Amino acid sequence: MPEKEVVEQAKEDLKEGKSPSTAAGEFVREEIEHVREGKHGARSPQQAIAIGLSKARRAGVPLAPPKAGKTSEATRENAARDYRKGQSAPKKKTSAKRSRASEQALKKEPHSTASHKALSAHAKKAAKAR
């Protein structure tokens, strides 16, 4: 569950006319901080970013799923589901068992993936691909 300040900041960004990806950046930043703090881990910087984007979509940020060819079909379907969840009526509470299971799985992942070095390498790689 994203922190209240992050959701408010994202809504403020959208009100100011900023793009949905800018508003989603708040969620990604929060997720990177969570990995650094040791709340949970991630296998790669991309996974931490993906978790942040998923949280943004579920919180109602109108961030469209990635286009075909950019990612796998499963990723696009998950993103589309998250987007629909965020745009629909208030959601039901996630089951405690499922929430606990996903949290435990993420805690077993490494925390070094959100280091400055790892994020720098990811940024350079992404820029090179562009």
Image (tube, helix red, strand yellow):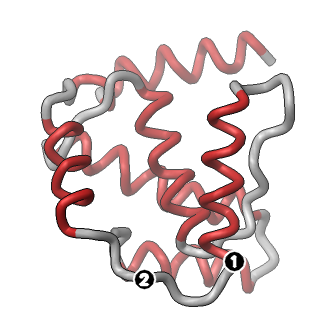
The x and y percentages for residue 37 are: 16, 46
The x and y percentages for residue 88 are: 67, 81
Task: Look at the image and tell me in which quarter the N terminus lies.
Answer: bottom left
Q: CA distance from mark 2 to mark 1?
A: 14 Å
Q: Which mark is residue 87?
A: 1
Identify the amino acid type marked 1.
Gln
Specify whether 19 is left or right of 98: right
Q: Which mark is residue 29?
A: none
Residue in the image at 75% along x and 82% along y? 16
- Write down the residue under mark 2: 92
Residue in the image at 62% along x and 89% along y? 89
Give whichever of discs 2 and 1 has the lower sequence position.
Answer: 1
Q: Secondary structure at mark 2?
A: loop
Occupied quadrant, residue 96: bottom left
Which of the two residues, 73 or 45, is positioned nearer the viewer here? 73
Specify whether 63 is left or right of 97: right
The x and y percentages for residue 82 are: 60, 60
Occupied quadrant, residue 10: bottom right
Identify the amino acid type marked 2.
Lys
Which of the two residues, 119 or 113, is positioned nearer the viewer here? 113
